[in-house]
Image: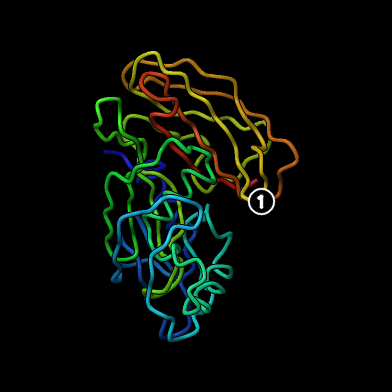
Amino acid sequence: MTWKTSRGQRRRTVLAMVVIPAAAGLVACSGGGGPAATTTAAPGGASTTAAPGGSAPGTSGPAATTTPAAAEFPYQPLWPYHDSAEAAAWQRDAGSGHQPWHLDPAATAQSFTQHYLGFSSLDKIVKVATDGDQSRVSVGFDNPNGVPVVAAVVHLVRMGHGDTAPWEVVGTDDTTFQLTTPRYGGTVSSPVAVGGTITGVDESIRVRILRSDRDQPVGRSAPIPAGGTESSWSATVSVSDACPATLTIVAATGGHVADIERFTITGVRC
């Protein structure tokens, strides 16, 4: 299985973004494809629960006992926070019970998929795999025979330190549908060259470029016909009035048994 953007590409990007602090006492806390907070090393503890739907799904978490400092985050943050300072502000207030779904990777992935990406039909959490500060949530739907289908594996990382640090979407882990251009965490300008590979039959890929503070996409493509085994696909997408910002590029395909059957994302700056 390849990772997002592929795994190697995202890991190289993460390592390139890491700033190794000079101050003593900073602890590395990440895992999986790369670090989760200030530096570069191994995962801390975390738990996960099944995901309810809706824009404010609920689980409860422990109250914060310390005030976390905003930390350098060595991934491309996509949603729901723009940066570590925003996440730290929420964490300082975590004991109040405000939006407790931030402590649940499955609920965060589902809200991201249904509300930010707008894929309301992807209403099923198929699997949750959490390892320390890394979580991979398989989101999808039931096919007409009632069999769960995975549309994407959303990769999340705790943004901050400890069990009260909220989860942040940083990408997807991809297999048969990949978005490899532009480079994860890279800088783009309009028009944006977008592309990757896909395995499938009679696919119709639609690309949208999103900015988290806008209600509508800042760019979109016409349907892109594709098919075959690991076949290349590409498009050029104009972006209007969106820079400077962090952008989420999402490519989706479907039409066989559901409108949206698979999707893949990457994050860039413009």
Element class at badge 1:
loop
Provide residue 119's location: percent of width, then percent of height.
Answer: 48, 37
- Picture coordinates of residue 97 (x, y %)? 48, 74
Q: Residue furthest right?
A: 241
> Percent from the top left, x then y, of residue 58?
42, 62
The residue that mark 1 highlights is 213
Using the image as rendered, state which of residue 113 and residue 121 is in the foreground.
Answer: 121
Name the quadrant containing residue 163.
bottom left
Report the quarter where the N terminus lies: top left
Q: Quick one: 148 or 71, which is closer to the camera?
A: 148
Tell me what residue is drawn at x 33 percent, y 67 percent. 41
Find residue 145 and report its image quarter. top left
Residue that appears at 38% across and 20% down = 231
The structure residue drawn at horizontal position 60% and vertical position 41%, both measured from the top left corner, is: 210
Numbered-mark total:
1
Residue at 25% in and 31% down = 146
Other residues around mark 1 within 10 Å, as few (<14) / some (14–19) / many (≥20): few
* In this rendering, position of residue 83 left or right of residue 158: right
- Above or below, 67 against 15 in this view is below
Residue 216 percent coordinates (x, y): 66, 39
Q: Is residue 265 left or right of residue 41?
A: right
Which residue type carries mark 1? Asp
